[in-house]
């Protein structure tokens, strides 16, 4: 069973899955009220989850929607450390604020020097 999919460009359009899928495409964890799922915006074609005995289709795994646990595990594998990145972001904001403040002071000093030279 070979299916082809037309994937719209750009492919990467991750977003919070609404409505929630029945299960996570990665770990097959069932959806509950607290679990957040991320839809990666790409088709999966992983088949179906069928009921034992009757073989009725319970869930079709046609999109890649991952639960927050799977996303966190992937981030850890990539050595993504939110606290470290948050510290870097805060430091960058501090440096940018300082640069903006110094630029404004520099502009004021240039005006003062220009006014004194003109006098």
Image: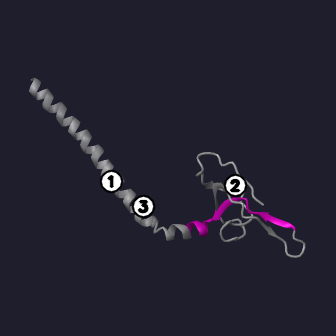
Q: Residue furthest front?
A: 2
Locate the N terminus by quadrant.
bottom right
Instruction: Give the structural element (helix, strand or loop) at label 3.
Output: helix
Instruction: Give the structural element (helix, strand or loop) at label 1.
Output: helix
Mark 1 and mark 3 lie on one chain; the one further toward the N terminus is 3
Decide if residue 83 is on the left or right side of residue 12.
Answer: left
Name the residue that disc number 1 marks. Answer: 94
- Image point (30%, 52%), residue name: 95
Q: Which residues are magenta?
A: 56-72
- Image point (82%, 66%), residue name: 58
Q: Residue furthest right?
A: 54
Q: Tell me where residue 118 appears, x and y as whole percent.
A: 11, 23
Q: Which quarter of the figure has residue 49? A: bottom right
Task: Examine the structure image and report whether residue 68 is included in the region drawn in magenta.
Answer: yes
- Image point (70%, 51%), residue name: 5
Binning the other alpha carbons within 10 Å of mark 2 as few (below 14), some (14 to 19) or many (20 upward) gives few
Mark 1 and mark 2 lie on one chain; the one further toward the N terminus is 2
Distance between mark 1 and mark 2 Cα atoms:
37 Å
Q: Tell me where residue 97 appears, x and y as whole percent.
A: 32, 48
Residue 86's disc is 3
Q: Tell me where residue 56 appears, x and y as whole percent.
A: 87, 67
Name the residue that disc number 2 marks. Answer: 18
Decide if residue 110 is on the left or right side of residue 101.
Answer: left
Locate the C terminus by quadrant.
top left
Q: Tell me where residue 27 appears, x and y as whole percent.
A: 66, 71
Instruction: Give the structural element (helix, strand or loop) at label 2.
Output: loop
Distance between mark 1 and mark 3 Cα atoms:
12 Å
């Amino acid at each position: 069973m070979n299916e082809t999919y037309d994937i719209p460009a750009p492919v990467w359009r991750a977003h919070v899955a609404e409505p929630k899928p029945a299960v996570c495409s990665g770990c097959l964890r069932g959806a509950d009220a607290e679990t957040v799922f991320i839809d990666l915006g790409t088709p999966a074609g992983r088949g179906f989850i069928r009921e034992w005995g009757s073989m009725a289709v319970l869930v079709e795994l046609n999109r890649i929607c991952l639960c927050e646990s799977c996303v966190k595990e992937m981030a850890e594998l990539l050595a993504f450390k939110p606290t470290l990145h948050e510290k870097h972001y805060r430091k960058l904001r501090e440096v940018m604020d300082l640069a903006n403040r110094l630029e404004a002071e520099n502009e004021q000093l240039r005006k003062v020097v220009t006014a004194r030279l003109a006098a």
